[in-house]
Amino acid sequence: MNDPEPYRIKHEDIEEQDQKEEYVESEEFTEVKEKQDVKSVKLTRSLTLKRRAKQSFTCTQCGKSFSYKQNLKHHTRVHSGEKPFTCDQCGNSFTRKGSLEDHMKIHTGEKPHTCDQCGKSYRHANTLKTHLRSHSGERPFTCDQCGKTFLRAESLKSHLKVHTKEKPYVCSLCGNSFSRLNVFKLHQKRHSGVKNHICFDCGKSFVRDAELKRHQKTHTGEKPYKCSYCEKSFSQAGHMKIHERIHTGEKPHTCDQCGKSFAHANTLKLHLLSHSGERQYKCDQCSKTFVRADCLKNHVKVHRKEKPHMCSLCGKSFTQLVALKLNQKRHSGVKNHVCFDCVKTLLQMLN
């Protein structure tokens, strides 16, 4: 009699093998399907990007084009003046929700972006990114006309107006024009007399927060910026930079009318008045006119008989500080200004 067991075993083996093959086929099918799905997603994404690249949403008012309809929608608010997002604390309005969220950090004092090198914190990630360049020394934006480098693209953009002589921002109150919008806005604040930033040590108020911070260093005596040529220290980096020009002889500000160069921009500005003949500062007592406000201020002391600068050695008083300093030099015996003709004659006599 034949044993049925071998057949059963064989049958089970075949069934198991069929199941394995079916599973493998199923797995292979799933893998192929997954690959096809991935390819399909990639293809769909690629087609979407290509379609977007071909699509262009153009502003009918200025001709500017955008890849996304939403960006065009935000842009049109520049023309319409629409600012739908309003701060419930100060009433300032914004064209974008993100701009309002950034603004709210001013009220909350939130500064989530911290420098890992010095611990300074910032409200915006981009401000931190720019700050990090002050540690690395990176100044990626270079002026192709004078070689000057900048931390930020907008600083370079503003600087280029120096070369083009472009001053698009004109004050409606006094007619002064400016190359930079922030300087123009600051100038307008000076007309309004608004000084929101107050020093709690002395009560003095300022138009800008930066001015207040500079002023506060006069109370603390802090002078962190040291001249690399002498022992002199300064409370501001800008003052140190200008001072160092005494040592280097650098005079970057040149008059385009006579070619004369100056170490300071303000000195050039005053010099230009000598060409224009403009003397806008007038004495209301004798009608004498002056190029500079400080010259008028000193002149007024003549009428008041005011002599605030007193010499501690001889008791003599002077209207102007420069006159006191000259008097003090006479006491010290220091005579820096030498006539070379007289010295030459004296040497010949001695010989």
Image (tube, rainbow, N blue to C red):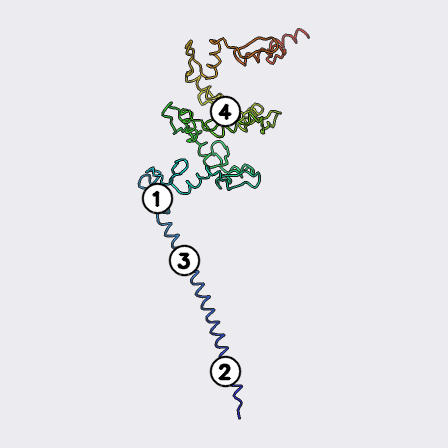
Question: Residue shown at 59%/8% (left/top)?
Answer: 315
Task: Point out the tag, 4 or 2, that comes first from the N-terminus.
Answer: 2
Given residues 146 and 194, the one toward you in this image is: 194
- CA–CA distance in space, label 1 to label 2: 72 Å
Residue placed most toward the observer, 335 or 88: 88
User: Percent from the top left, x then y, of residue 224?
Assistant: 58, 29
Asked whether the residues under the numbered discs 1 and 2 touch, taking CB atoms below 8 Å apart as contact, a structural biologist would say no
Sequence-wise first label, 3 or 2: 2
- Spot occupied by residue 88 in the image (x, y as percentages of width and height): 40, 38
Mark 3 surroundings within 10 Å by alpha-carbon count, few (fewer than 14), some (14 through 19), many (20 or more): few
In front of the other: label 4 or label 3? 4
- Residue 83 falls in image quadrant: top left
Q: CA distance from mark 4 to mark 2?
A: 102 Å
The three-letter code of the residue at mark 4 reads Gly
Residues at marks 4 and 2 touching, judged by CB atoms closer than 8 Å = no
Q: Which labelled disc corresponds to residue 43?
A: 3
Q: In the rendered structure, which disc, 1 or 3, sits on the residue that comes first in sequence?
A: 3
Numbered disc in front, either 3 or 2: 2
Residue sitting at 45 percent across and 63 percent down?
Answer: 34
Give the amino acid at mark 3: Leu
Residue drawn at point x = 34 percent, y = 37 percent: 81
Q: Which residue is mark 4?
A: 203
Under tag 2, what secondary structure?
A: helix
10 Å neighbourhood of mark 4: few (<14), some, or many (≥20)?
few
Q: Residue lying furthest left in this view?
A: 60
Q: Earlier in the sequence, mark 1 or mark 4?
A: 1
Is the Cβ of the residue at disc 3 closer than 8 Å to that at disc 2? no
Q: Secondary structure at mark 3?
A: helix
